[in-house]
Amino acid sequence: MIGRLMTMTAHPGRGGELAAVLLRVAERLRGFPGCEIYLISQDAADPDTVHVTEVWQDDASAQAALAAPPPADGPAPADVLALLSAPPHRTDLTVLGGVGLPADGRP
């Protein structure tokens, strides 16, 4: 399994809007093959900073999600990028296990 921590900073005062759009992305990923966790969190000290915690079965699953066309009524990657004041920061992780992951999915 692989993980990613994404930190995104919205334009001033637009953190709630960014979080809402990312929650819609998360809903689209519910049941997406290989997506184990897609968690949206807003920084308690800075509401314009939003974090996305991702866990995927493998990199191919994550890439497939990125390549999938957005639904007609859903947000596109450009909708997220338009809300950002700077490029997102990505940290790649090797997932070892933990609460919330399927027991049979641990490496």
Image (tube, grey):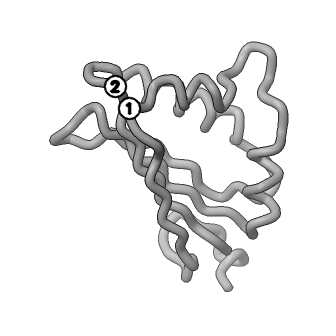
- The kind of residue on which mark 1 rests is Ser
Name the residue furthest left: 45
Residue at which label 2 appears = 11
The local secondary structure at tag 1 comes to loop
The local secondary structure at tag 2 comes to loop
Q: Earlier in the sequence, mark 1 or mark 2?
A: 2
Question: 91 left or right of 31?
Answer: left
Question: 61 left or right of 92?
Answer: right
Residue 57 on image: x %, y %: 73, 68
Residue at which label 1 appears = 85
Mark drawn on residue 3: none
Question: Which quarter of the image is occupied by the C terminus?
Answer: bottom right
Asked if marks 1 and 2 touch (Cβ < 8 Å), the reply is yes
| Residue 62 vs residue 11, the one in the foreground | 11
| Residue 28 vs residue 8, the one in the foreground | 8
On screen, 64 above or below 9? below
The number of discs equals: 2
| Residue 97 vs residue 52, the one in the foreground | 52
Question: 68 left or right of 39?
Answer: right
| Rendered residue at 37%/30% (across/down) | 10
| Rendered residue at 57%/49% (across/down) | 38
Question: Which quarter of the image is occupied by the N terminus?
Answer: bottom right
| Rendered residue at 27%/23% (across/down) | 12
- Around disc 1, counting alpha carbons within 10 Å, would you say few (fewer than 14), some (14 to 19), or many (20 or more)? some
- Distance between the alpha carbons at the discs numbered 1 and 2: 5 Å
On screen, 27 above or below 94? above
Residue 13 picture quarter: top left
| Residue 33 vs residue 85, the one in the foreground | 85
On screen, 23 above or below 44? above
- The kind of residue on which mark 2 rests is His
